[in-house]
Image (cartoon, rainbow, N blue to C red):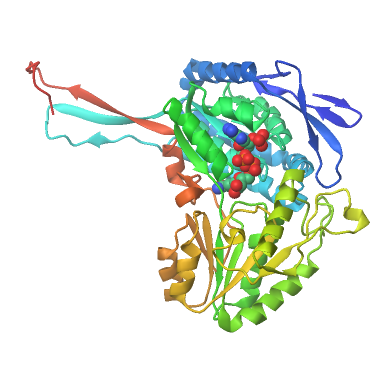
Amino acid sequence: MENNNGVKRYQMYIGGQFIDPHDDSYIESVNPASGELWALIPKGEKEDVDRAFQAARQCFESDEWRGISPTQRGKLLRKLAQAIADQAEHLARMETQDNGKLYREMLAQMKIIPAWYEYFAGLADKVEGSVIPLDRQSVFNYTLREPLGVIACITPWNSPLLLATWKMAPALAAGNTIVLKPSEFTSASSLEFAKIFDEVGFPPGTLNVVTGYGHTVGDLISKHPMASKVAFTGGTETGRKVAMNAASHLASVTLELGGKSPNIVFADADLDAAEAGVIAGIFAASGQTCIAGSRLFVESSIADRFITRLANRAKEIRLGDPMQPDTQMGPAATPGQLKKIEEYVDIAKNEGARVLVGGERPSHPELANGLYYYPTILTDVNNSMRICQEEVFGPVLSVIPFDSEEEVVKMANDTEFGLGAGIWTNDLKRSHRMARVLEAGTVWINTYRASAPNSPFGGYKNSGIGRESGLEAIYDFMQTKSVWVELSDEIRDPFSIRT
Ligand code: NDP
């Protein structure tokens, strides 16, 4: 990597080497808080993608990787976890420079990432086959769980390393190798991660990082014939394309897609906790999270009071430099994302929504060069409006009052998405009743935006296919082989099937 006038020029990581892109061209990475160019990211092409898959496949078939035991894989993953923990501040700074999210948020992410590698390191040697009790006693039938091969991982810009980790930790623990393509907007942390990975002692080709555009590198990776599985996080439309690409060579997929998650506040809730949870759900990370609680349903009897509280709190949120410890909301990650937020607020207003708070960019000179947008609360909306049905991926909250449990469940489920849902109530029975009927992969009761390595995460409906984290995640990166051993000396009839 070269450093020219403070601008870093990165290389891709393929087959255990840091190399320049095939056609020597680069994508500019701009800090969204300052507008400054700070890094040049290699613009990969087909040659780079092919080279990465060849390296990954060669490694997958090598004794150096296939020959090591699951316990040894676990040890390598633990070493990796420690190396990441040692570099947490450095990696967090990279991500904040790239996507504008708060440094303290990114540092918290870097500090919990090792827990995923440790969890799957521990699981690596606990994956067991089984002995099948066949009717035919002379046959010994057992199963082996085996890795799939090369896993193509594609990640978005909002939490680049955390979301890559959710794929890579179980995939590596299961014995696969990886080709990773991060978002063109936030590739630096994955390339910095590659440097850490390189020193841990994995065989060359276990991890390969190819950077570049989604419509070229992402497209090529998801349809590459050597990809045994595509693990993708991103928007629902892109997810569909990726799934169709994977289908072209019958690779399996895990898709973690968009959301329009409901946050539901009942009158009996602890309103201090609910207020903090609603704010965390939509304004943390400037609303740029897949689990953003972007639709607030609040029971009518407390609606005015609760909305006033939220509005007052939203007005106090401190926008600013994401590196500063007292900043509460940073900029949008890209100019395109900021434009999308502005357009959706206009669409909502045209459909009759009222802007209670925000609804514009700040005019403060200190924020002029950054992609900032005020925390925004919209009222006079109904659930069928586009603002309540389409993902904004920004700090925009739509508020809808409700009168009954039945009514709110109907509205909460009335969306193509099903990623998360929040319920705020002190009624124990109601909370569990609601958890059963809400169509979402995660339901948080009296909490929001929480995750852990051992808890499965994923979407219902158009929010995705498959689960990341938790026990099932490692099996998603494996295939089952059934082995039949005839123990008797009996000679079979060659013309009839054996059971
Ligand atoms: P995109 O779908 O635009 O991009 C996601 C990734 O796919 C990026 O690496 C992108 O590359 C790549 N890509 C783009 N086009 C293609 C293509 N044709 N073929 C293959 N890959 C492609 O999403 P965003 O980056 O804008 O991220 C935001 C989205 O991610 C939101 O919808 C959000 O809800 C979702 N998300 C879901 C999460 C979940 O766990 N369910 C978690 C976090 C985010 P490039 O950026 O270079 O174009």
Q: Specify the quadrant that holds the N terminus.
A: top right
Q: Residue lying at the far bottom in this picture: please name it.
A: 301
Residue 426, given in percent of the width and then of the height, sits at 51, 77
Residue 414, given in percent of the width and then of the height, sits at 48, 62
Residue 169, given in percent of the width and then of the height, sits at 54, 37
Up/down of 495 relative to 269, above or below: above
Q: Is residue 176 left or right of residue 22?
A: left
Up/down of 344 relative to 67, above or below: below
Q: Specify the quadrant that holds the C terminus.
A: top left
Residue found at x 66% / y 45%: 159
Residue 43 appears in the rendering:
yes
Residue 405, given in percent of the width and then of the height, sits at 46, 75
Among the 4 quarters of the image, the one containing residue 27: top right
Q: Quadrant of ligand 1?
A: top right
Up/down of 118 relative to 306, above or below: above
Q: Is residue 226 left or right of residue 199?
A: left
Residue found at x 9% / y 15%: 494
Q: Nearer the viewer, residue 391 or 345?
A: 345
Residue found at x 66% / y 64%: 397
Up/down of 104 relative to 403, above or below: above
Residue 334 appears in the rendering:
no
Q: Is residue 82 left or right of residue 66?
A: right
